[in-house]
Amino acid sequence: MIPLARPAFGPEEEAAVAEVLRSGWVAQGPTTARFEKEFAAEVGTKHAVATSSCTTALHLAVIAAGVGPGDEVVLPSFTFPATANAVIYAGATPVLVDVERASLNVDPDRVEEAITERTRALLGVHLFGAPCAIERLASLARENGLFLIEDAACAIGTRIGNRPAGSFGDVACFSLHARKVVTCGEGGLIVTDDDELADLLRSLRTHGVDRDAEVRHAKGAAPPAARYVRLGYNYRLSDVQAAIARIQLARLGEFVEERNRIARRYDAAFADLDGLRSPPAVETGTHSYQSYVAVVEREAPMEPDALRAALAARGVSTRVGTYAVHREPYFESLFGERSLPVTEEAARRSIALPMFNGMAEDDLETAVRAVREVWQKNPATH
Ligand SMILES: Cc1ncc(COP(=O)(O)O)c(C=O)c1O
């Protein structure tokens, strides 16, 4: 079976883990601090705060935005449920809006319509590594006095023009999960330019510790007792994970280039398949292709589920793109049944194809051939 995704780990990652194990410091420590500096430099922000996942990063971002009960945060419904859950963790209401048909990213016109006097923050998602209309969201946030969070879970290596995704929001959250471009299995980061926010995020990540006390603790031979000044969490990344992530981050340029090469091969192979829509190429910027997600249009010769089943039978793994969050049972139980037609269509008709670094040419050609053959065996009936 050709997998959907597979981390590209090699001897350098193994050596980095061995070094941390031998050092005796495996919890969060100096390796994480180094990784945070390198990550901030990559995204072009002053600070990066490593966390245990992007979900926990989003939770802290929502708290840092001052969001609480009675507040609303506007975000796309076509996303992973974690984006909306982070808002619910803070006791606030996620206001789910529709996406653009072409990009599958949040539609900024729908965001603008959804802003009310209860709105406290906007949450833009760069889905699958494709840049969303973040400049437009930044203007809306500025005009309305709102906090802007970027969910850049899939977007390390993504650029809007020449500017990295994650450098537009008040804060941005990244994922290091196994299906992401840079991975250490599980992990995340929040980036920001704001010194006070960075201090708050570091405190929240470590049980609500007083930051000054924590710094003194790190330096002193007989450190003073820490003070706990707010409700906090244990949302830390370990140095074992950071050691892997540092090596991966150094390979980011190479990773994104390879993913773009695979995407161009898929695009070219599907160009003459009527009804199979490739993700639109990014003209002024960079798509990181965390996932390659095509859409099986209504006029296609077959339904998306039938295509996925036929590909599985030929040894090619696929997944749905992502979810119509407002139609998932938990969210329907909270907010009732609503209709967001573009999101619903995207959730039903999107298909993620194998995309990972180190994908063998033979596997890529097998995947391409499988899609073409299945498609051509099913002549259009419309
Ligand atoms: C858009 C988006 N946001 C958030 C997350 C959550 O990331 P993590 O698994 O690191 O918690 C994901 C995970 O796939 C995602 O795709």
Image (cartoon, rainbow, N blue to C red):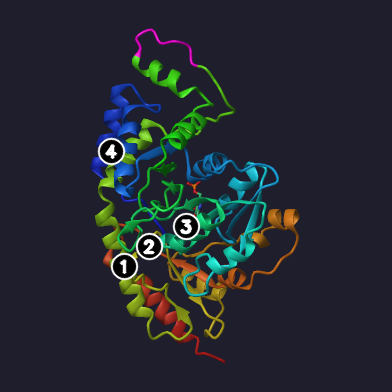
From mark 2 to mark 1, how far is it between C-alphas?
9 Å
Residue 34 vertical position relative to residue 218 in the rendered view, above or below: below
What main secondary structure does the magenta stretch of the protein show?
A: loop
Q: Position of residue 214 (x, y in %)?
A: 43, 20
Q: Quadrant of residue 109?
A: bottom right
**Three-letter code, disc 3:** Ala
State which mark lies toward you, 1 or 3: 3
Residue linked to disc 4: 14
Label 3 crowd bin: few (<14), some (14–19), many (20+), radius 10 Å: many
Q: In the image, what residue occupies the spot 66% across and 59% down?
A: 328
Write the start and end of the magenta stretch as one range.
Answer: 220-226
Q: Earlier in the sequence, mark 4 or mark 3?
A: 4
Residue linked to disc 1: 262
- Is 72 on the left or on the right of 55, as rendered? right
Q: Is residue 107 in view from this perspective?
A: no
Residue 289 is tagged as: 2
Q: Earlier in the sequence, mark 1 or mark 4?
A: 4
Residue linked to disc 3: 138
State which mark lies toward you, 4 or 3: 3
Q: Earlier in the sequence, mark 1 or mark 3?
A: 3
